Amino acid sequence: MRYSHIANAYEKIEATTKRLEMTSLLVDLLRQTSEELIGKVVYLTQGKLYPDFVGIEIGIAEKLAIRAVSRATGYNEREIKADVALTGDLGVSTERFLKKKTQKAFFPEPLDVAGLYSDLDSMAKATGSGSIELKTRLLAGLLARASPQEGKYIIRTVTGSLRLGMADMTVLDALAVAFGGGKDARRYLERAYNISSDLGRVATAVAKQGIEAAKMFEVSVGEPLRPMQAERLSSPAEILEKLGGRCMAEFKYDGERIQAHKRKGQITLFSRRLENITDQYPDACRMLVRSVQAEEVIVEAECVAVDADTEEMRPFQELMHRRRKYGIKEAMEEYPIALFLFDALYIDGSDLTLKPYLVRRGRLEKVIEQDGRVRIAQSILTSDPEELEQFFENAVETGCEGLVCKSVAKDAVYHAGTRGWLWIKYKRDYKSDLTDSVDLVVVGAFHGRGKRAGTYGALLLAAYAPEQDIFQTVTKCGTGFTDEDLRDLPEKMKAHHIPHRHPRVHSKLKADVWFKPEVVIEIRGAEITLSPIHLCAEDIIRAGSGLAIRFPRFTGNYRLDKAAEDATSAEQIVGMYRSRLKKLGS
Ligand code: ATP
C-alpha cells in the first residue's frame, strides 16, 4: 500500500468538519487496507506507532525536523525557519519546499506504508550517541522520496502535530461499519478496545476474523484495561436507592490508582491514564510479587503514601513526590507507600471482567496474601444509611477521601472505560483546610512498634472545652518527632503518668498510657474533618460526630509557656472548621 493513499485520505479528512463524513472517509481507507497493515494504519491515523501504554513515541524535535527538511530539499535551515514563522506550521512549510525542490531525484521510489512505518519505528527506538544523526538521516531519506503532500503529513506525524481530530470512538465507528456490518457492532468493538486499550489490535482482529473476533476478545496480561469509573451522589439514602437497597461500601483511599499486571514473576504497573509507571514504584512491585498468590493476574489498587514510623496514611500531596524519573531510591525511602487492592480483573486464565463484583472481590481476597503494606480495601456490606454514614466518617478519619459504594447486583460487571452507576463515590463537604497551628494537650500515648519499640508510636491529643472544663480528644499524632524527641518522651512524660484515663479527659480511644492533662504541644494538621472517634465538639456540627485533625505533625514546639487550659479550645476548632469548609465540587 502506497503512503500517498493515506496522505490523500488525511487531506480529505482534514477538510471536513462533519463527524459522519470523517467516519465514512475512514471507512473507505480501512476497507482498502490489507489485514496485515490495518493495525499500523490505525495507529498512524492517530499520529502513533503503538498504543499509548507501550510508551514508544516518535517525538522528533522541530529543530531536527528542520534539518531533515533542509537535507531533503537543499534549502538551508534559516530559510525553512523563516518560512515556518510565516506559515506557523512546519508541515505546510515542508510541503512548500518539497514543491520548490531543485535537486529532484529521478523517479524516486514511491513510499509504501510498511517501509515508512519501519523507518518511523527505527527513529522512535533510536537512543544514545549517534541517534540524532540516525533520526535525521532516516527522516531526510523519507522526505527525499515523498511527494509534497506526503512530506507534510510525515513531518506532522513525527513532530506529534498530526491532528486529524480522529477520536478513538470515531475509529471504532469506522471499524464497525467497515468490518462489523454496521454501527450496531460498535458495542462489541468498544468492549474489545476498553479491555485492551489497543485500537490496532482490535482493528487487526476484526479485519481478519470479523465481528466474532471482537465478541471473543479477552483481557490479556500486559495490556492495561481502560479503568472503570464512578458516578457520584451526595447522600447514603440516594446511594442505597440507586444500588437497589444494598451495596458494598469501600474506603476511597486518597492516592494514585494502579493497575498491576503479573506475568512470569514480573510486575508491570499502569497508571489511571495507562502510562507504564513500573519504574516509579519498585517497592510496589516487590510487595506485589510477595503478596500475589497466582501466576498471572491483573488487579487494581490505590497506592497511598504512609508514614514510615506510624504506618498511618499521609496526604495525597506526599505521594506526588514519587512522580519522578530520577532519585527513585531516595524518594522510596522518604515517601513509603501502602497498596489497597480493590478489584481483580484476571486470574490465571480466567477473565473476571464479566463476573459480578462480589465474585471478583472474593477472588481478590483469595489471591492476595495481606501484610502490613498490602491490604484489601476496607469494606462493609450494608443496606443501612446510618451505617453507611458511620463508615464514611470512619474512612475520612483514617485518612481516606470518602467511600466508593459498589453494586452487588448479579450484573455488576467490571465496566472498563466507563463512568457508570455500578460504582458511586461519596465525598461531601466534610473537611476543611487547617492553616494555623494548634496547641493541644497530651492526654495519652500508644506504644510504638518496630523501629519505635520502647518509645511511643503516637500521642493522643485533646482540645480544651472551657464550659465543661474538660479535654476532648481531637487527634492521634505520631509524625514530626525527631529521634531525640522519641528517645526522651517516655522520660519527659513520666511525671504526668497516671494508671487510668483522667476524669477530665473525654476519649473513646483507649490509650496504652494515660497522662494528667498538663503538657501542651504545638501541632500542624492539614485538615479538620468530622469524626466518629474523636469527641472534640461532639454533636455540634452533626449529631453523633466530633471533629478530628487529620494528618497532624508535631512542630517541635513544646508549649511550656502554656497551661492545659490555655490550649486551643474546641470552640476555636469549630470556628476553623466552619470558616474553611471546602466545597467539594468534583
Ligand atoms: P476522584 O478525583 O474522585 O478520585 P476520578 O475521576 O479520579 O475521581 P473516579 O472513578 O470518579 O475517579 O473515582 C474512583 C477513584 O477512586 C478511582 O479512580 C480510584 O483511584 C480511587 N479509589 C480509591 N479507593 C477505591 C476503591 N476502594 N474502589 C475504587 N476506586 C477507589
Image: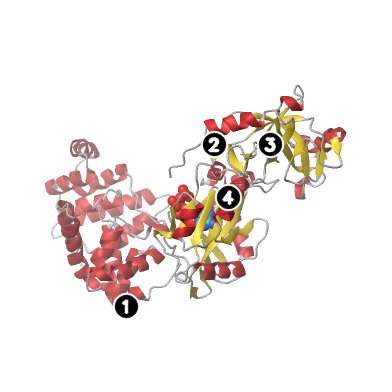
User: What is the spatial separation of the Cα atoms under label 3 and label 1, in whole angstroms?
Assistant: 60 Å
In the image: residue 242, left or right of residue 307: left
Give 562 or 119, whichever is nearer the viewer.
562
Specify the amino acid type for callout 4: Val
Q: Which residue in the protein does label 3 denote?
A: 480
Q: Is residue 272 visible?
A: no
Mark earlier in primary sequence (3, 4):
4
Specify the amino acid type for callout 2: Ser
Residue 121: mark? none
527 over 268 or under it: above or below: above
Residue 304: mark? 4
Ligand 1 within 8 angstroms of badge 4 C-beta: no
- Evaluate if marks 3 and 1 touch, with contact meaning CB atoms under 8 Å apart: no
Q: Which residue in the protein does label 2 denote?
A: 432
Percent from the top left, x then y, of residue 573? Answer: 62, 32
Give 244 or 134, whichever is nearer the viewer.
244
User: What is the spatial separation of the Cα atoms under label 4 and label 2, in whole angstroms?
Assistant: 21 Å
Of tags 2 and 1, the one toward the viewer is 2
User: What is the spatial separation of the Cα atoms under label 2 and label 1, in whole angstroms?
Assistant: 53 Å
Specify the amino acid type for callout 1: Glu
In the image: residue 309, left or right of residue 100: right
Ligand 1 within 8 angstroms of badge 3 C-beta: no
Residue 212: mark? 1
**Residue pictured at 14% horizontal, 47% vertical:** 101
- Evaluate if marks 1 and 4 touch, with contact meaning CB atoms under 8 Å apart: no
**Residue pictured at 29% horizontal, 60% vertical:** 169
Instruction: Tell me which corner region of the image, top left, top right, bottom left or bottom right, holds residue 472.
Output: top right
Instruction: Tell me which corner region of the image, top left, top right, bottom left or bottom right, holds residue 167.
Output: bottom left
- Evaluate if marks 4 and 2 touch, with contact meaning CB atoms under 8 Å apart: no
Mark earlier in primary sequence (3, 2):
2
Give 250 or 215, whichever is nearer the viewer.
250
